[in-house]
Structures are given as C-alpha cells and as structure tokens.
Image (tube, helix red, strand yellow):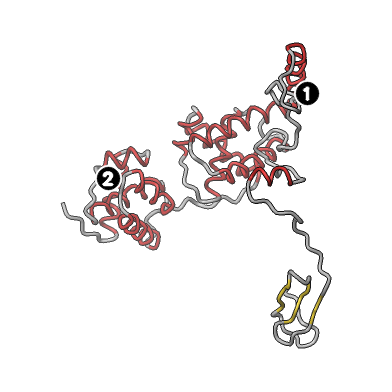
Amino acid sequence: MAKKCPECGSTKIIRDESKGELICQKCGLIVSEELVDLGKEWRSFDSDQFEKRARTGSPKKYVKLNKGLVTMIDRKGRDLRGNKLSSKSKAQMYRLIKWHKRASVSSSMERNLSIALTEMRRVASYLNIPESLVEAAALLYRKTVEKGLIRGRLIEAVVSAILYTVCRTYHVPRTLNEMAEASGLTKKEIGRTYRFLVRELKLDVPLTNPIHYIPRFASELNLSGEVQEKGREIIKKAIDEGLISGRGPTGVAAAAVYIAGLLKGERRTQKEVANVAGVTEVTIRNRYRELKKELDIEVAA
C-alpha cells in the first residue's frame, strides 16, 4: 500500500537518500526522517574487491546437496599462506576430505539426493535448460522425496519427469522425446512417472502451446524472423479454429514452420523439419494437410 502524506493526502512521496527523508512531492512536507539505510556501507569496483569486502556467503542453492551451505575442504594441498604442505600433512588432509564427504552423505535420503541432483544437472546441461528452472526442479524433487513418492521408481525417471514438468510450467519447450534421449529411458516410462507426480502433488501444469516451439524449430532450420512470425500467425489461427485439440503440439508447430517456410520462400523439406521437431514425416504431412485445408492457406507447389 502506497504511503500517503498526512497533510494533503498525496501519494507522490519521494525518498531523499542523502538526508534519509521521505518528502511529499506536492506540498513539501517531510513525512518521515532519519531513515535507516539497509544497504552495504562499502563499495567495490571489481570482483576481487567484492569478495574481500563481502561478509556474507552465496545464496542457498537447492540443486546442491547441502544447499551450498556446507564448508568445503580445499584440495590444493597448501596452507593459508600459500605454502605447500608436507607429504604427511597432505595425506592427513586427504583423509579429512574423504571422511568429510562420507559424513555429508549419511542417510538414505541424502544418498538419493546426491545421485538425483547430479543426474538433474547432467540432463539439464544436455538439454540446455536455464539455471533458474533447474533450481525450481531441485526444490520440487526435494518435496517429492519428503512425501515418499520416489519409492519403487527409477531416480532417472523421476528426475526427467520433474524437469519436464518445470519446463512445461515455465513455457520452456522440451519434449518427452528429448527427455528420453537425455536420460536413456523410454518416453513411456517418463510419461507414466510425470502423470503420477502431477496427480500426487496436485500440480497445475498448463497445456503446451505450440507457439513456444516455433522460435526453436525456426532457429535450428536457419529460417528468418519473418518465417517465425508467419508460423506464430498460423498457430494462433489454428488455436482460434480449435484445430490443435487432441494433437501433439510439436507436430502442429513443425507443420506451421514448414508452411511458413513455403510461404516466405525459405523452403525446407519435410524430412529436415521432422528431424528437428522429433516427429515423423507422416505427422507433418497430416498436420500440413489439415492446416492448409481448414485455414484456407494457398501454398505454391
């Protein structure tokens, strides 16, 4: 709720950082004074100065086993002054590191998290999933473990299903076929685990919009921005006409890109489009005929 001036009732309040005052812009009344500056009292001009002067650590990261809050023992084999350790001290240090790692993964839940989070980072890296989404997926996996929903299920399947769920939630297009390729599992196994998690966790996952696939397919086929825009236009018309109901979003998006390329003179073969989209040429042909007929699109032979 916006702060109001007690004198004139105006909400146009400005903050004077140098004097620590809140001033009404309309009548000039000092609404509040002696404000506390909660920011840092030091400045830094490069990363080295920032690291030396900062008195706090990095934020919590759910994708790390101990959320990034654990103390790590360095393996450089040097003391605080940078001098090399003796062979005896080095051997003691390595034993400490070994026992430190064992102590940090003591329970079955921690062992499970250790394996799952490593697999999650690997799959996310393979599919180029943004770091913010990996964090969301790690948090969701931890909730899944706490509810005991992973018993009797492959860790890889649960990880892939959660990444797929997060990608759909945040409109980052990744298909089940891509998840299957990255994890080495079948599409059927990941799909079954995904449906189970959505049901048990009561997740509200939005339907995949084919428009989200257009930029990616067009980019991989080296098509112009005009083709992308035309592809979006075709998809929007198809949605308005109710043509995508019951059809795979990747197939519809691939057909729209194929048609847009033909209309803009940037022809790509159905095989090239199918390889990029991860669907069959038959699917593209069927969606192409439907869109062409129902939307009355004139495509030159």
Number of residue marks: 2
Q: Which residue is mark 2?
A: 285
Residue found farthest to the top: 88
x and y percent of residue 203 in the render?
Answer: 62, 48
x and y percent of residue 277 in the render?
Answer: 37, 42
Q: Quick one: quadrant of the N terminus?
A: bottom right
The local crowd at label 2, few if under 14, some if 14 to 19, many if 20 or more residues have their Cα within 10 Å, is some
Residue found farthest to the left: 301
x and y percent of residue 43 in the render?
Answer: 70, 54
The answer to whether mark 1 and mark 2 are in CB contact below 8 A is no
Q: Which residue is mark 1?
A: 103
Q: Secondary structure at mark 1?
A: helix
Question: Residue 152 sits in which quadrant?
Answer: top right
Checking the image for residue 196, the label placed there is none
Q: CA distance from mark 1 to mark 2?
A: 58 Å
Q: Secondary structure at mark 2?
A: helix
Vertical placement of residue 55 versus 42, above or below: above
Question: Residue 230 sits in which quadrant?
Answer: bottom left
x and y percent of residue 189 in the render?
Answer: 52, 31
Q: Amino acid at mark 1?
A: Ala
In this view, the residue in front, 170 or 97, is 97
The local crowd at label 1, few if under 14, some if 14 to 19, many if 20 or more residues have their Cα within 10 Å, is few
Question: Residue 24 sits in which quadrant?
Answer: bottom right
Q: Amino acid at mark 2?
A: Arg
Q: Is residue 238 left or right of residue 203?
A: left
- State which tag comes first along the sequence, 1 or 2: 1
Residue at position x 79%, y 80% in the image: 30
In this view, the residue in front, 7 or 170, is 7
Residue at position x 70%, y 82% in the image: 25
Vertical placement of residue 244 versus 96, above or below: below
Q: Nearer the viewer, mark 1 or mark 2?
A: 1
